[in-house]
Structures are given as C-alpha cells and as structure tokens.
Image: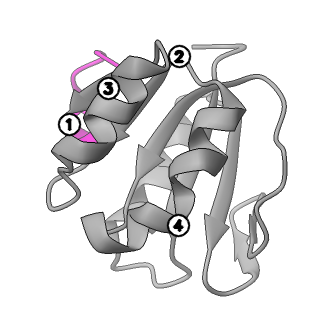
C-alpha cells in the first residue's frame, strides 16, 4: 500500500461520517491520503481541501458523494488519471462508471472500510 496515494472525495470533519473514518483507517494502514470536502479542516494529519487541486500520482479515488453531486467532479476525477475509483455504498453511479471505463479507469462498487479491514485495499 505504500506509494498508493488515495483521494477521498466528499470528506467530512464529522467523526461519525464514513468518509472521516475512512481517512483515519487509510492513515492507520500507511496509505498516503488527500481529501476534498465542503469544509476546510484536518482529520489526523490530512488536510481537507475545498478546492479541486491537481493532486499528483493518485492511485485510488474513493467517493463519498451521492450520484447527483458527483456530476461536478466527473472531469476533475478523470483528469487525475487514477487507476481506480471506489463507489462506496450509496454512491453507485452507472453513468460515471461508464465514463471511467471509456477513459481506461477501473471502478469498484465496494466499501473502502471493508476493503481495508479485509486487507483487500
């Protein structure tokens, strides 16, 4: 997992939100993590940015946005050229899955927390 950078899209400062828990688990597993959310802040040592920075070397994007809110991020995520995008429960979006496939980006409908806890991340 070292060298496999993850971007959490839809990151929350609320410790009860799955995106927040995912950031903590990614860090616990030694995964370099970046995050974008509606509010700036920090989870552990990860800064949540509100602007769409062009992060370098993103391996995985894990989504915590409902399908409607994802639309604004389609091109941004495609331009990052990640190896894969994880659609967490409630974020499933077949339109975006097809766009990703058309751009040679793998997608997974899965739960980041489950993948991490079963060492399948």
Query: Residue 79: x, y in percent?
Result: 69, 35
Q: Give the range drawn in magenta.
A: 111-121
Q: Quickly name the residue at label 2.
A: 83
Near-viewer residue (94 or 58): 94
Label drawn at residue 72: 4
N-terminal of the two: label 4 or label 3?
4
Q: Quickly name the residue at label 1.
A: 114
Based on the picture, tell me whether residue 117 belongs to the magenta stretch. yes
N-terminal of the two: label 2 or label 3?
2
| Secondary structure state at the residue bearing disc 4 | helix
Q: Which residue: 24% across, 49% down?
A: 88
Is the Cβ of the residue at disc 3 closer than 8 Å to that at disc 1? no
Marks 1/2: CA–CA distance: 19 Å
N-terminal of the two: label 3 or label 1?
3
Query: In the rendered view, does 78 fall on the left or right side of 55?
Result: left
Q: Which residue: 84% across, 45% down?
A: 54
Indicate the quadrant where residue 66 lies.
bottom left
Foreground mark, 4 or 3?
Answer: 4
Foreground mark, 4 or 1?
Answer: 4
Near-viewer residue (51 or 71): 71
| Secondary structure state at the residue bearing disc 1 | helix
Q: How crowded is mark 1: few (under 14 residues within 10 Å), some or many (20 or more)?
A: few
Marks 4/2: CA–CA distance: 20 Å
State whether residue 117 is above or below residue 43. above
Is the Cβ of the residue at disc 4 closer than 8 Å to that at disc 1? no
Q: Quickly name the residue at label 3.
A: 107
Q: Which residue: 41% across, 29% down?
A: 100
């Amino acid at each position: 997992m070292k060298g496999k950078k993850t971007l959490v899209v839809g990151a929350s400062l609320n410790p009860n939100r799955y995106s927040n828990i995912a950031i903590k688990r990614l860090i616990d597993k030694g995964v370099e993590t970046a995050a974008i959310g509606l509010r700036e802040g920090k989870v552990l040592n990860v800064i949540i940015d509100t602007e769409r920075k062009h992060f370098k070397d993103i391996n995985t994007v894990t989504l915590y946005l409902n399908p409607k809110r994802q639309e604004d991020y389609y091109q941004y995520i495609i331009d990052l050229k990640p190896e894969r995008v994880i659609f967490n429960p409630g974020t499933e979006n077949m339109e975006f899955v097809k766009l990703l496939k058309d751009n040679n980006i793998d997608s997974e409908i899965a739960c980041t927390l489950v993948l991490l806890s079963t060492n399948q991340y």
